[in-house]
Image: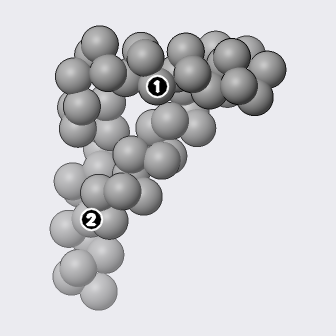
Amino acid sequence: MTLALDLAVAAKDPRGLVTPELFDQMVDDVVAFDKVTRPYAERGVEQFLVFMKA
């Protein structure tokens, strides 16, 4: 249980895991490849970063 709590706290701001430039590039790639809106792509990239952190 402690591990899950630690991961939840560490993942509060997934954008902080990469540089702002890299985050924007990742979002741009998702928008272009998957043909989705930017807000949708941003949420997806954030969730990907949380997954990679875990």
Q: In the rendered view, would you say 45 is above or below 28?
A: below
What is the C-alpha distance between the residues marked 2 and 1? Answer: 23 Å
Residue 52 pos. (x, y %): 36, 56
The answer to which of 6 and 45 lies nearer the viewer is 45
Horizontal side, residue 52 vs residue 5: left or right: right
Which residue is disc 1 drawn over?
A: 26
Element assignment for label 1: helix
Quarter of the image with the C terminus is bottom left
Q: According to the image, what is the colour scheme of the structure?
A: one colour
The N terminus sits in image quarter: bottom left
Residue 12, by quadrant, is: top left
44 relative to 27, above or below = below
Left or right, 21 with reference to 28: left
* Horizontal and vertical percent position of residue 13: 29, 37
Give the residue drawn at x 57%, y 22%.
Answer: 29
The answer to whether residue 51 is above or below residue 45 is below
Name which residue type carries label 1.
Met
Camera sees residue 41 = no
Residue at point 50% right, 46% down? 47
Q: Which numbered disc covers residue 7?
A: 2
Q: Nearer the viewer, residue 26 or 38?
A: 26
Query: Which amino acid type is marked by label 2?
Result: Leu
Residue nearest the viewer, comparing 12 with 54: 54
Toward the right, the furthest residue is 35
Q: Nearer the viewer, mark 2 or mark 1?
A: 1
